[in-house]
Amino acid sequence: METNKNTIWDVDEQLFTSLEGKYQSENEAVFFRNMRFKQEYEVALSNDLILSENDNEDEIYLVRVEYDEYLVGKGESESNEAHLMNLSEALSLNLSSVGLAREITLLNWLKERDYAGIKYNHNYDNL
């Protein structure tokens, strides 16, 4: 069986390439390797819950849509949600724009937590 590879955005390709060998932790390496694989080979038509608002004190969530679009939000209100076209945009999002009480990008927030709460097995297409 042949598997088609999704072409990822140039900015995401640059992101993945620029971080190779420069990860701050093993959890960061796992995150970026998994996200690259997911974007290239694992479609999520029914969404892929990467981080649940129930798994962190700030109630931040990260959902992958199809191959490489993302929803980032806080709590359960859609008014506190942003739709981003690729991982680079999602990681650059200032979480204050979705209701977090401080200025920090999603990437820096994830680094502070060493990627705690991230799940790689919640693609609703596969559950």
Image (cartoon, rainbow, N blue to C red):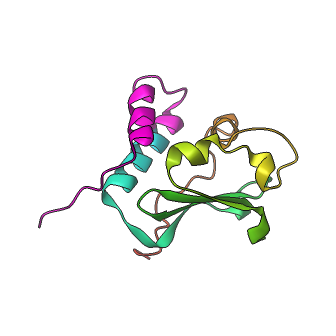
Residue located 85% across and 41% down the image? 102
Q: Position of residue 57 (x, y in %)?
A: 80, 53
The residue lying at 39 percent from left, 40 percent from top is 10
- Quadrant location of the C terminus in the rendered image: bottom left
Residue shown at 63%/52% (left/top)? 117
- Residue 1 shown left or right of residue 86 in the figure: left
Q: Quadrant of residue 83?
A: bottom right
Q: Quadrant of residue 20?
A: top left
**What span is in magenta?**
1-29
* The magenta stretch spans residue 25: yes
Q: How many numbered discs, if any?
A: 0
Is 61 left or right of 118, judged from the image as shown?
right
- Quarter of the image containing the N terminus? bottom left
Going by the picture, which residue comes out furthest to the left?
A: 1
Q: Say left or right for 109 vs 51.
A: right
Task: Answer above or below: position of 115 versus 59.
Answer: above
* Residue at the far top in the pictured view: 22
| Residue 107 covered by magenta stretch | no
Whether residue 76 is visible to the viewer of this picture, yes or no, is: no
Q: Is residue 83 above or below residue 19?
A: below
x, y percent for residue 13: 38, 38
Q: Quadrant of residue 105?
A: top right
Decide which of 99, 122 is in the foreground and name it.
Answer: 99
Please state the horizontal and vertical placement of residue 95, each as a whole percent of the image. Answer: 75, 47
Q: Nearer the viewer, residue 69 or 47?
A: 69
Q: Is residue 63 visible?
A: yes
Q: Percent position (x, y) of residue 25?
A: 53, 30
